Image: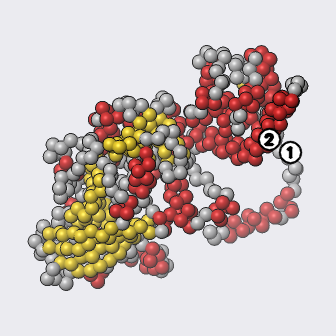
Amino acid sequence: MARSESDVSSESSLLDPKADEGWEDVEPEEEENLPVVSLFSSDTFPDAKSMIEDCKQRYNFDFVGAQKQLDLDFYASIKFANYIRSEVKKGNSQPDISSRELFEDEKYLQPVLEDDALLFSLDDLPPVSDHVADSTPHNTEDLAKIANLEETLERLQNTQNQYSEFVKRTLEDTWDEREAGLRSLPQAKQSEMTEHEKGDDSYFKSYSFNDIHKTMLQDTVRTDAYRDFIYGNKHLFKNKTVLDVGCGTGILSMFCARAGAAKVIAVDNSDIVTKAREIVYANKLDNIITVVRGKIEEVTLPVQQVDIIVSEWMGYCLLYEAMLDSVLYARDHYLAPGGLMVPSHCTLRLAPLSNSDFVHEKRDTSFWKDVYGFDMSAMMKSEEYNDANICVERVSPESVPAESSMFLNLPLETIKLEDLQFRKQFTIELSRDIESLDGWLIWFDTFFLANAGGTLPEGGVKAEDWAKSGREGVAFTTGPGGQETHWHMGIMLIKEQDRMKALSKGQMITGSVEYKKLESNGGRALEVGIRWDAKGTPVQGEQVWFCK
């Protein structure tokens, strides 16, 4: 970014020795030490060591000894401290510390005590080996235990610092009022990543911000459909184990928990999981919902199988983002035979666009030719609406001169990964005369069927007609026949030289639609190619658009 003259002038004045006149060196303020509250009372101590010693003498509770006995690293020690505080808060002055399983739950990452200085002082506690050395060993067995402990300590110390930084960062992000931000990988780690991995990393980071989740939650068509299906079919969820792939804020997981699910496992690889854990805890659903950080392809779930998989995986033109790949992986590895996919089906639809005013407005680049008297035509090359990019926007039904053609049906229970790249034929009949074929529109319909193995009617059905037909289940469309959604529609404008050719009502347009994945953006980008031919007319063409 270019610097202004005032910036340069400011820097020069800062380098001028005369600018320091009248100033005296100021000693940096000492870091404030917060008092450490006892684990068993409201007494406070100047540091963690003295608090731990008091607990040992007054309450016969040896915190450091328990760390050694349970083989706790820093991360587990955070949970252990919060577990003790939560038990004492309940009135249990003698918490059970016989097993690590008692405090394995992620909820114990949340501080019981606000501004708990103990959590940030665990690094200052005496090493476990020092603590053991306070007692004189009486036999060879004791010496062997100490030697084994020291070996374990040496191994743990290699990772303790990174645990410390991770947990401190997690606590700050989770219980701070600041919005979640992006945390860049260390430069060394970035240099090791392939372009594919960098694109994938950027994809997950994009879901760390609050705004994108607010947009999705405010999409009532989307969110209401999931809620209505889950709450309307509580008998399907009662006492079942549910897997939520790409859980985001955890809204779908909480719907399932409120519907009676016995256990919900919410998985996401974005920083949003720290917020999701807090949301789940705040809504008292942490006894049902377990939030897991990581890619579904890489994490280890606490169960072998699940009864239901729920996910909001749909992207622009349905398959942009390639998140369905992960959902299919989860299905193939975790869904029990006869299990339910939510949603159960999606269909892709294609329709022609005819609205010359719309096209002219979107392609008008005259603004760049004279910006305050300057020629900025170079910016025209990056205009959003052009012949190469798929754009997402809603258009009115009046701009669609034909019934849409369903060119792909995706039954989530049986669709395979290789089926997500394809070429499909279509046939469209114009319902009115048009001055020109200006582009193509692609959108998708989503269906929630309550019975595993259910199928859509032969030849397909529009989501907007689903409820009218009296069929069971829930459905919504992102097309012009329904309410607006955040997905809108994919708009693909035809090259100028192929436009402005009139067609008549009743004429048939045939062609094909091809979907391909691109390596850009971590393999999540999409290429859409369309061929078309209005028989007996010069209206024909072949074009490729990109959604990056």
Asked if the residue at tag 1 contacts the one at tag 2, i.e. Cβ–Cβ closer than 8 Å, the answer is no
Q: Quadrant of the N terminus?
A: bottom right
Residue plotted at (44% across, 69% down)? 518
Residue occupied by mark 1: 27
Residue plotted at (32% across, 77% down)? 543
- Is 498 situated above or below 201? below
> Residue 123 bears which disc, if any?
none
Measuring from the top left, give residue 116's x and y in whole percent: 68, 31
- Is 290 situated above or below 389? above
Alpha carbon separation for disc pair 2 and 1: 42 Å
Residue furthest toward the front? 140
Residue plotted at (38% across, 57% down)? 315
* Residue 32 visible here: no
* Residue 514 visible here: yes
Measuring from the top left, give residue 512's x and y in whole percent: 26, 72
The amino acid type, in three-letter code, at marker 2 is Glu
Measuring from the top left, give residue 309's x and y in whole percent: 39, 44
Dot 1 falls on a residue whose secondary structure is loop
Residue occupied by mark 2: 151
The amino acid type, in three-letter code, at marker 1 is Glu
Q: Quadrant of the C terminus?
A: bottom left
Q: How is the image coloured?
A: secondary structure
Given residues 384 and 251, the one toward you in this image is 251
- Quadrant of residue 156 within the rendered picture: top right
| Mark 2 or 1, closer to the camera | 2
Given residues 62 and 334, the one toward you in this image is 334
Measuring from the top left, give residue 278's x and y in whole percent: 53, 36
Other-residue count near label 1 (Cα within 10 Å), few / some / many at <14 / 14–19 / ≥20: few
In this rendering, would 362 be left or right of 193?
left
Dot 2 falls on a residue whose secondary structure is helix
